[in-house]
Amino acid sequence: MAIGFGSDKKAQNFFKKSLEINPDGLDVNYFYADFLYDEKKYQAAFEHLQKAKSAPKRDGREKADKYRQLEVDELLAKVEKKLKKH
């Protein structure tokens, strides 16, 4: 999945600001990990996926959280595969 910000530098700044606001959030950590994966920063992606996996449950968002966690698991498998190669 790709999210467009206009430039990688802008994306990095938006993610940093979002993480300042919600450092343990499921969505921000997942999407930042996805960005980092695309940037070939696999160890950093792994770390943010671990945060996403342990993100607190959100009231009223149970179904969304369930499906986002499945996406986290899929990306985590890809990241772990890349980390084993390096």
Image: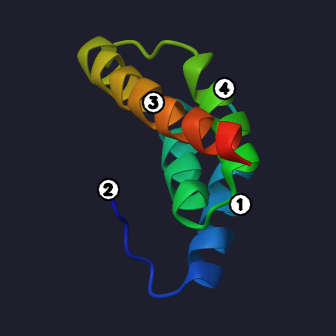
Q: Mark 1: which amino acid?
A: Lys
Q: Place residue 64 in its image quadrant.
A: top left
Decide: marks 1, 4 in contact (CB < 8 A)? no
Q: Earlier in the sequence, mark 1 or mark 3?
A: 1
- Mark 2 and mark 3 lie on one chain; the one further toward the N terminus is 2
* Distance in Å between CA atoms under marks 1 and 3: 19 Å
Looking at the image, tell me whether mark 4 or mark 3 is earlier in sequence order: 4
Q: What separation in Å lies between label 2 and label 4 (alpha carbons)?
A: 19 Å
Question: Image point 32% across, 19% down: which residue?
Answer: 61
Q: Residue at x 57, y 15 (%)?
A: 56
**Residue 39: which disc?**
none
Foreground mark, 1 or 2, reads 2
Q: Which residue is mark 4?
A: 50
Q: Amino acid at mark 3?
A: Val
According to the image, what is the colour scheme of the structure? rainbow
Residue underneath mark 2: 1
- How far separated are the C-alphas under marks 1 and 4? 17 Å
Find residue 72 and name its label: 3
Tag 4: amino acid: Gln
Amino acid of disc 2: Met
Q: Residues within 10 Å of mark 3 (few under 14, many from 20)?
A: many
